[in-house]
Amino acid sequence: MFDLPFTTERTIIINKPIHDVFALVSDFKAWRVWSPWLCQEPECPVDITGTAHTVGHAQAWNGTRIGQGDMCLSAIEPNQRLEYALTFIQPWKSKSHVTFDFTPENDGTKVVWSMQGTVPIFLFFLRKMMSAYVGHDYARGLNMLKEYAETGHVLSRVDVKGDVERAGFHYLGLHRTCAIVDIGPQMQADFKMLSELQTQQIVPAPDFHLSFSHQFNFTKGRCEYTAAYGYENPPEHQPDARLLTGKVTQHHAQQVDHFGAYRHLGNAWSTLMGYQKHTRKKPAKRIPKYEVYATHPDQCAEEDIHTQLYAPFR
């Protein structure tokens, strides 16, 4: 009576037979590979009990950053449906009903991951946000489940570096707003345009590549960012109305590194946001969060792509 309900649902097509995908989802030992929460805190203690693929199979976790809770397999319709009872203890107490539905899709499997959850009534203003954020987590998890089922691995590893001191730098960039689902191809197009401006000698070669994250609104599915060239010293460039120019002063930041495919960068951002909340650091007012691309994707294997994420703080 003191909780408010919310629902969320995400869907994906996995190019594997139903029985293969069903087996992965009904075994908590496999969740360690594709869980959108455990990847944020790989060292989190997890206690798995019961027999995989059977009612009563359960996992309980007690993390420093991802909270505490347990999840138990409560009902099974073989190769069709799995139901789980989910209990959160920290950061607040709540109970949720989670389902996975599996249907054939051509030669693969359509997976629908759903939750009927609750938030405490005193957090009523978070209900829409919770639906959007859990949906974002589900999308990350389903993408990793798909990759794991189809290839046997997930090209994503997160490393929390902690608090660091960053030198100041200058930048030239392209400022954009777009749908979150379109950010990958849009940012790729922006860096291609910056490369063309470099070829035309409008901008000089950068010391490094980066992008600023100005705003991500998961409720509306929109984002605002700047794809940029970074410079240690003020760059000499031709005037161009398309370019946003600026300087970032020396600052302190929390750093999380991601190794692997850009499609899984959401794992690192979720980790950084959780780490920032856990340490209660106040974000810097004038310096947005940003990511630096430490490797060029055309010059290394996909699993070795290195991206550094920074959350400046006061």
Image: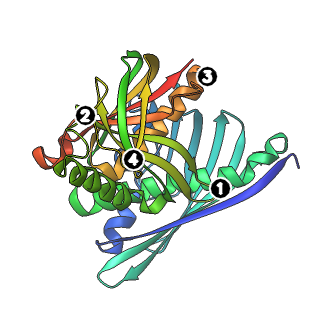
Q: Going 31% across and 26% down the picture, which residue do you hit?
A: 234
Instruction: Look at the numbered disc 1 and give the secondary structure of its residue.
Output: helix
Q: Which badge, 4 or 2, comes first in the chain's sequence? A: 2
**Residue under circle 4?**
243
Q: Going 37% across and 44% down the picture, which residue do you hit?
A: 173
Considering only vertical position in the picture, is 238 above or below 103?
above
Query: What amino acid is found at the position of numbered circle 3 in the picture?
Result: Lys
Instruction: Look at the numbered disc 4 and give the secondary structure of its residue.
Output: loop
Say if mark 3 contacts mark 4, CB within 8 Å: no
**Residue under circle 3?**
282
In this view, the residue in front, 45 or 34, is 34
208 to the left or right of 269: left
**Residue under circle 1?**
131
Residue 184 falls in which quadrant of the image? bottom left
Other-residue count near label 1 (Cα within 10 Å), few / some / many at <14 / 14–19 / ≥20: many
Q: Position of residue 279 (x, y in %)?
A: 56, 20
Other-residue count near label 2 (Cα within 10 Å), few / some / many at <14 / 14–19 / ≥20: some
Label 3 to label 2: alpha-carbon separation: 27 Å
Residue 285 falls in which quadrant of the image? top right
Query: What amino acid is found at the position of numbered circle 1 in the picture?
Result: Ser
Q: Going 84% across and 45% down the picture, which residue do you hit?
A: 121
